Amino acid sequence: MSSSSDSRYLKGGPVAKRILASVREAAEQARNEGFPPKLVSITVGDVAAVEVYVRNQRAKAELAGIDFEERSFPADLTAAELEAAIHGMNADPRVTGIIIQRPVPPHIPIKALQAAVHPLKDVEGMHPASIGNIVYNQLDLAPCTAAASVELLKETGLDLKGLEVVVVGHSEIVGKPIAFLLMSEGATVTVCHHMTRSVAAHARRADALFVAVGKPRLIKADMVKPGAAVIDIGINAETLPDGSTRIVGDVDADSVKEVASWITPVPGGVGPLTVAILMRNTMVALNRQRAAYEATYATGPSKLAAE
């Protein structure tokens, strides 16, 4: 049965459409109030793979009523020059959010760039302060892929309180944030990684299984609890016998869907939702910036008078 007609598949498209419609409404209201939202995309060097992401982000921003600007920098730019450019965007009130397209050249440390983006403009949820906020249950500006994955689990209608969840993969931008987001919802979370002794033993007891390791078809049917929800975040290019390639996930979907109650298709699952979350984060960022601006503007004159 194809993913288009199988109710077991958790598709990202319909959820993304709902989110983008909600964002568009909020963006129009903000624009009418004099706060037009604007995303700035930073690309360093000429990377063909990045162009696809940027086109997709631009298209979704247009659907969401958010202005989108691409700023391209030469590959030989120094890290200090790029950070200076980011600080300029931080200070520009017309810029709501900043996206750093990856990969960047090897001489530029990506974590330093992420830390250079002001937390109020960190729509990717990658600043150390944004990650730290998740630990304190401030969940509305989380890394996009992690937030999209949790959003799809919520689509099942499962009660997350006390839910047994296993996350396979512990990266800073996916695995770890997913774990914190789910713990904040009351789930019991186990995180597996390359030093875990038996991933299969952990995976088999999960009510919800998240997989993000970059290994095609790692999770087989005998590693999944009957009736579980399986969220596949992997994107891998698999070469077929005729030399062509296709995109597959970290889960062997053909076998696992016979065991699981829900499974995300790859492609078509987490991916389409990730960009919609980016747009939702942009409006979260705009509202935070407005609140900070209005608080400063409102208290500024009274403070001066008091002094």
Image (cartoon, rainbow, N blue to C red):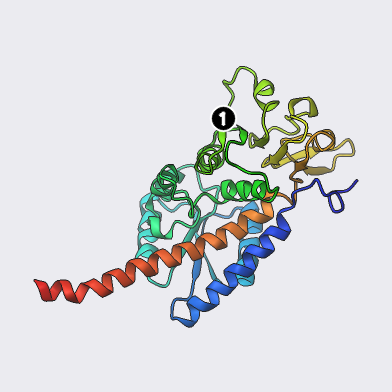
Question: Can you name the residue that lies furthest to the top here?
Answer: 197
Q: Position of residue 255 (x, y in %)?
A: 84, 33
Residue type at the position of mark 1: Val
Relative to 288, 153 lies left or right: right
Residue 67 falls left or right of residue 306: right
Q: Is residue 102 visible?
A: yes
Which residue is outermost to the left? Answer: 307
Q: Which image quadrant is residue 167 in?
A: top right
Residue 109 appears in the figure:
no
At which x and y percent is residue 140?
Answer: 49, 55
Nearest the eye: 217 or 15: 15
* Vertical placement of residue 230 versus 103, above or below: above
Q: How many marks?
A: 1
Q: Position of residue 277 (x, y in %)?
A: 58, 57
The residue sitting at 49% across, 79% down in the picture is: 31
10 Å neighbourhood of mark 1: few (<14), some, or many (≥20)?
some
Against 300, is 73 above or below? above
Q: Residue at x 91, y 45 (%)?
A: 1
Name the residue that disc number 1 marks.
Answer: 191
Element assignment for label 1: strand
Residue at horizontal 40%, vertical 44%? 136
| Residue 239 in the image: above or below residue 3 | above
Q: Nearer the viewer, residue 104 or 173?
A: 173
Where residue 127 appears, as percent x and y from the top left, is 42, 49
In the picture, the quarter occupied by the C terminus is bottom left
